[in-house]
Structures are given as structure tokens and as C-alpha cells.
Amino acid sequence: MSKNRNVGIVGVGQSVFSSHREDVNQPEMIHEAVVEALEHAGITMDDVDCVVHGNMELFEMVHQPDCWHVLGTGGWGKENLRVTTGGTTGATLACAADNLVASGLHDVVMAVGFEKLQEGHTTGGITNMADPLWSRQLQTGALTGMTAEQMITEFGEERAKKASMKYRIIMDEHAMLNKKAHRRLGLSMDQADDLAATSPALVGELRMIHMCSQSDGACAVIFASEEKARQIRGDRRIAWVKDHITAHREELFVVFGEGPVKSTHRYCAEKLFARQGIKNPVEEIDCFEMYDPSSWWGADWLRDFLLLEGDEHLKLIENEEIRINGKFPVNPSGGVIASNPIGATALVRVAEAALQVMGEAGDHQIPKDVRQALASGFGGTLWTVLMLLTDQPPC
């Protein structure tokens, strides 16, 4: 998986995330993230060769929004590429931007993801994409109690519920450190039992408190070749793109019988870590920005992403090792449960991982030195994207 040249992230920008950004239209909201990314890098749009733009068009019902959004991206007269791959869109934007620079086609590429969900209907968009006969399993949209049921069956009701709620509260504690996060509820561990009992039920054991929100917001990340990156960043740390991988498993959704056992999360992790020589992810990776649509999924998915067995993933949560100051910090930004502007959500994971490597995440900066960070994207029919960032150029 060698590249023609190294690629580094040199600038990151995010709008404020909220359930309703009625103070701005789509281009204006995107402009907030773009301006911040340019200022963070210390460049102007004159230095950007290409804009890679993405969102879920069906959610806002605006066809080819990248044409309108040139007013916000500043991409007039430049190369523009529009990408949509479901919930993974933001991570796909990052992979596409990296590839465009690594190939030598462009020197500086800006990836821009956004969603303005107050102007659309997420679940309506998802359910109308699914055939009512052959894809009946998709008709609940993003809501499913399947993972909760599986965890309860494997680990018992009390332990599974406590682990999920502990994960949720830790994510909120992190979100409280991030001034741009949407849901900053100020939760504490002594509220766990009350939250589990009183939060409205959605599907099975999945409750409102466990689930991510719909958020309005935008994110912009600037990728540059090694030569340009060193010119732009100077003495400041660069977040280098070490590797990334994508896996799609459409056949997981079957009408009869059971789907394949190995998840796309574990498949991607095994392949990525093997080719990068990572033997023990928990020890060798300093930060993980995970696409966690609910606390049930976040708690469960740690096992596959980190190649753990048995209940090792639950112990990470129970021992509070996923805290920002713990052994293996997970989502110091608050994660997807805190902010979910779908077209930007997975790009935010890459952006936040990059900020950690740069040492510029502000109030939610991990206290230890972050030399290697992992970011994930999730969407579609259990699609997975993983991107590995490092503080040193890969080659």
C-alpha cells in the first residue's frame, strides 16, 4: 500500500453543531468550517487546488448541492468532486482527498462535509431508499435494538446495560469539554440508574439517551503533499495520513439465514493493522475517534475495532480506560452521540483525530502525547472506513 508521496493534514475547521442552525443557510454554514480550516492552516483559497464535497442529498432534497455551495466553499473555478456513500460519506471524502494528493494530481485538497438536517427528514430518506420486500430489515432506518439484545444475551442484562450507560456518560463528559458539540448534557455517573429507567424507549433496550441526534453542521479538512505541508505548517506538527481502508458488505443483509460472522469493522482492523505492523492496538494507538451511532454500538464495536476477545472491550469501559485521561482515550470530542451532521460526521472523526496528533484540540486535548490516532466511519449496509494518522511521515 505504498504511496507516490506522503500526505499530511494541515488545517481543520468545524462549524458549531446544533439541532437547528436557523441563523444560516447551507452555504453560510459551510463557510464557517471552510474559513476556520483556512485560518488554522494559514492559507487562502488561492492555495487550494481542489474541493471534495459530500453530504446525503436525499436528507435535504437538494440535487447537486455542491453547485450551490460554491458560495460557501469558495471553490469557484476550481476542480470540484462530489461524493456520497451514506453515513461513511465524511470518511470517504477524507480518503478521496488523500488519494488525490498522494497520486500527484493535486498538491492541496480541501474535503468539505455537511448536513443541515432541520431542512430534511433523515429516517424518511433512509427508509425510502430500501425496497419494502427485499430490504425489510432497513425499514427502521438507523434505529435498531439488535446490538443491545446481543450484548444482553452474551454478558447478562445488568452488566450490558451498565456498560452501555457508562460509555454514554463518559462520552457526554468529553462533549462538555468540546464547545462545538451539539449535545452537552452535563451527565454524571450517579444519574446512570435514573437515565436507564426514565429515558424514552426507541426500539427494544435502545433508549433516547443512548442514541445519537440529528445535527446541523459542517466540517472542512485540508490535505497537502509533504512539500506543501511542511511549507504551510512550518514548525507546527502535521497529522500524516499513514493508511486507510474501506470495506462494503452488502451481503450482510440477507432475507434468510445468518449473514457472515466477521464484521466489516474487524475485517478492516485486521487488514489495516497487519500491513502497518500493529500487534496491540490498545498499546500502540493513542486515540480513537470512533463513529458510534449509539452507546450500545460504541461499547460493542470496541471489541472488533481493537481486535479484542471475550469481555476485554467491556473492561475498558468498566475500568474507565476510555476516558480522555485514560489508557486508551475514545472520542475525546464527545463522538457521534454528541454531534451527528451525517454528511460531515465521519469527516469530523478524521478532523478530531488530526487535531489530537497536532496537539491543537484545545480543551479536549488528550493530556498524553498523541503519536498515532485512528478514525472510523460507518454507514450504508454496515460499511466501514478506517484512517490511521501519525505524527511522522509514513515513508
Image (tube, helix red, strand yellow):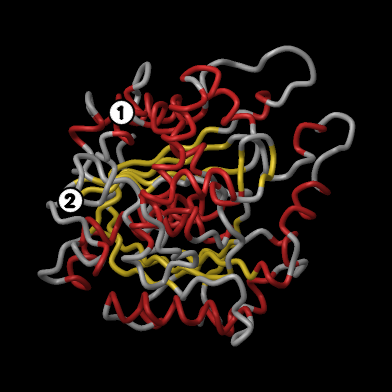
Report helix, strand or loop for mark 1: helix
Where residue 225 appears, as percent x and y from the top left, is 29, 60
Q: Residue beneath label 1, please?
A: 315
User: Closer to the camera, 79 or 275?
Assistant: 275
User: Closer to the camera, 321 or 275?
Assistant: 321
Residue at the extreme top: 257
User: Closer to the camera, 199 or 140?
Assistant: 199
Q: Is residue 327 left or right of residue 264?
A: left
Image quadrant in which you'd find residue 62: bottom right
Q: Residue at x 66, y 75 (%)?
A: 67
Report helix, strand or loop for mark 2: loop
| 393 lies above or below 309 | below
| 355 lies above or below 48 | above
Q: Amino acid at mark 1?
A: Lys
Where residue 319 appears, as percent x and y from the top left, is 26, 35
Instruction: For the N terminus, give its image quadrant.
Output: top left
Q: Residue beneath label 2, please?
A: 370
Image quadrant in which you'd find residue 163: top left
Q: Residue at x 44, y 65 (%)?
A: 184
Spatial CA span between label 1 and label 2: 23 Å
Q: Amino acid at mark 2?
A: Val
Instruction: For the C terminus, give its image quadrant.
Output: top left
Residue 191 has which mark?
A: none
Query: Is the C-beta separation of discs 1 and 2 under 8 Å?
Result: no
| 339 lies above or below 235 | above
Q: Residue at x 31, y 34 (%)?
A: 318
